[in-house]
Every structure is written in C-alpha cells, then in structure tokens.
Amino acid sequence: MLKVEHISKQFSSGDTKVAAVHDISLSVETGVFAAIIGKSGSGKSTLLSLLGALDKPTDGTIVVNNQDITKMSDRKLIGYRCRQIGFVFQSYNLVPNLSALENVMLPMEFAGARGKDRQARAEKLLKEVGLTSEKFSRRPTRLSGGEQQRVAIARALANKPKLILADEPTGNLDSSTGKIIIDLLKNLAKSEGTTIIAVTHDNAIADQAHVTFKLKDGKLEK
C-alpha cells in the first residue's frame, strides 16, 4: 500500500521559492492500478521522483508497505529502490546488448538472487506479460515497441517490488497497443500483489485505471 500525507517539494530560484508539488495527500491500496494525470508542468515528474525515492520532499511523508521512505538514509534508499520499487519508462530503457531474458534477470542479479532462480522467475514473468518463448533470446532491436514494453514491465516486476511507477508507459505506442499494455498493468497489480501507478497526460489511461488522481499546478484537483 502507498500512503502519501501532505507532501510538498520546493525549489529555489534566486530569492524565490517555487512549490513544484504542494500539500498532496493520497493513498493507493495493494493490488490497485492507479493513474496520476496532468498536463506538462503540472508537477507529475516531481511527484514521480518523490514517490520513487529519487528525491525527498520538503515536507510530508511517503509510506510504502509500512515503511516511511522519507526518513531513510541515502544508503538505505539505494537498496530500497533496488528491491522495493520497479520503474517502467516511456522509452523502455532496456539494455540494448542484452536479450529480453537477460534484461529481466539483471535487477535480480543486482539484488543478489541465484542464477537458477533469476532465470526461472524471468521466464515466468515474460510469459505472464505475454511474450512468446521464441522471443526470450532476442535483443530489444528485434522486438516491437509493445514487446519491448512488455519486457520492461517484466523487468520492473523482477524483484517483487511493493510499488511500480510507470512514466508515460504508452507514450511511444499506438492506441491499440497502448490499451493492451494498460490492461496488462491493471491485471498485474492484482496478480502480483503490488501497487502500480502510471503517471501520464493520457486520459485514456485514466479511463482504465481503478482510481485516478488529477494534478494541476502542483496540487491535486478535488
């Protein structure tokens, strides 16, 4: 479960302080696929960085699975991001010289999982996201955009994270493939027992999400 209470993030510009995110509170249960939507400049990127423990809020708390990540040291946050948070990006961010299977195994290698366990879970996840076995050995350049995003989703799930953050996950896909990917994320939230949040400007994602939050000028619209 994700629970955010009164978080704000201020940046200094000369003598002026600018609130990129202001007094945001929200909660998302485990097994839920949520969308945070907003136009460019609404604060989505800043909020994503805060939820992903890539930055710390000026005020407020962020609790993931009963852990307050805003109070963790920088050293602890490195391990936390590796094991407890998964990221899915618009541009997929797959390692080009690794196969689909190797890309999914990589986070587990960093986390110290055994080789046989890494391969077994990677194969299971790739099948779960709908990639056919004959494509496991292909490198990203030999996969379609939708297939690359499936691999990226499987990689995000590799270490059984409590929270997955998807940054414009359908931005490089056609509408038909994008809908398939959103349906996949929605189903995986429940089957994998994780919280998945898509940060996007695409209202189509909001229509398919279990719950939607609208962001404008760094604040949640009510």
Image (cartoon, grey):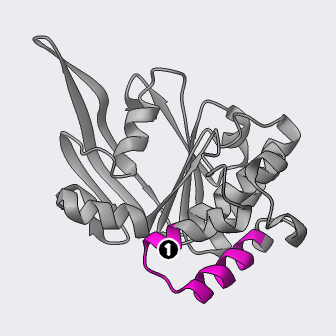
The chief SS type of the magenta part is helix
Residue lying at 47% horizontally and 31% vertically, measured from the top left = 215
Q: Magenta span has 29?
A: no
Residue projecting furthest to the left: 15
The vertical placement of 48 against 122, above or below, is: above
Vertical side of 165 occupied by 101: above or below = below
Horizontal relation, residue 11 to residue 123: left or right:
left
Q: Residues within 10 Å of mark 1 (few under 14, many from 20)?
A: some
In this picture, residue 106 sits left or right of residue 13 = right
SS of the residue at dot 1?
helix
Residue 76, horizontal then vertical, whole percent: 23, 65
Q: Classify 143 as above or below 111.
A: above
The answer to whether residue 221 shows anywhere in this view is no
Front residue of this view, candidates 141 and 198 = 141
Number of numbered discs on residues: 1
The structure residue drawn at horizontal position 74% and vertical position 57%, both measured from the top left corner, is: 150
Determine if residue 207 is in view: yes
Question: Could you tell whether 59 is left or right of 157 in the image?
Answer: left
From this viewpoint, which residue is outermost toward the front? 97
Q: Is residue 113 magenta?
A: yes
Q: Where is residue 51 shown, x and y percent of the image? A: 38, 50
Residue drawn 54% across and 28% down?
Answer: 38
Residue 199: x and y in percent read 55, 41
Magenta residues?
107-126
Q: Quadrant of the N terminus?
A: bottom left
In the rendered image, residue 28, in percent from the top left (x then y), is placed at 48, 59
Using the image as rendered, state which of residue 66 and residue 71 is in the foreground. 71
Foreground pick, 7 / 151: 151
Residue holding disc 1: 109
The amino acid marked with disc number 1 is Glu
| Residue at horizontal 55 percent and vertical 67 percent from the top | 106
